[in-house]
Image: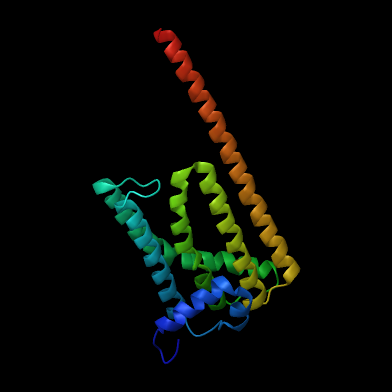
Amino acid sequence: MSNGTFDFSLFIKESKDTLLNPKSHFSTMKTAGGITEPLIKAVIYGTVTGVIYLLWGILKIGSIGGGLIGGAVGFMSFVWAIFGAVIGLFIGAVVLLIISSICKGNTDFEANVRVTAALMVVMPIYALFNVLAGFGVYFGLVINLVVFIYSLWLLYNGLVEALKCKQEAARIVCYVIIAIIVLFLLLGLSTKSRLERNLNKEAKELLKDLK
């Protein structure tokens, strides 16, 4: 990005580098230059994510219904994806700044905004793989967990390479985040399993009473 204009071809290259070679990308990325560039990035990632959800809704792919209802749900998802990307950019930057501070890294807000914008490249990927939840709850959870762990790998490189955090501290933070997410997933699955057992039991009792 140069001369006050947004270079879309460079944006595509940076997005690929973030996903495929995060260590190299974050070690050379600029952490200053204004927030217009990261804001545009967030809007683009949000728009692409919204388009994917919109298509899932219209084509009746995954858990979103098709037809008019699916299209309406997909359109709302499209709008919220863009809105959420813009809001998430600044909220995420604040969270990242706190993490960077804990890890003795760069606490400049703009630097954290730029790293957050780069990390948002995973938004369309989450949207693409979200369709797999329609083929089974557990399968969808496994896929989402894999994508999430890779997102943490990107986060780790952003903290260490771009924000100059201490490696050990950044590693510990990522491990803690993984542990918390896995714990919540296990609790969610346990609750779902108990709920299903209770519903099956009530259904059997109801059928027994009807007989």
Relative to the observer, which residue lies in front, 1 or 145?
A: 145
Using the rendered view, name the quadrant where residue 153 is placed.
bottom right
Q: Tell me how the rendering is colored.
A: rainbow
Q: Is residue 133 above or below residue 55?
A: above
Q: Is residue 46 above or below residue 143?
A: below
Residue 107 in the figure: left or right of residue 204: right
Relative to the observer, which residue lies in front, 193 or 84?
A: 193
Please provide percent x and percent y for residue 185: 59, 45
User: Outermost residue toward the front?
Assistant: 135
> Can see residue 144?
yes
Q: Is residue 158 above or below residue 76?
A: below
Relative to the observer, which residue lies in front, 19 or 98?
A: 19
Using the rendered view, name the quadrant where residue 159 is placed.
bottom right
Please provide percent x and percent y for residue 85: 43, 64
Q: Residue at x 39, y 60 (%)?
A: 81
> Can see residue 35?
no
Q: Residue at x 59, y 35 (%)?
A: 190
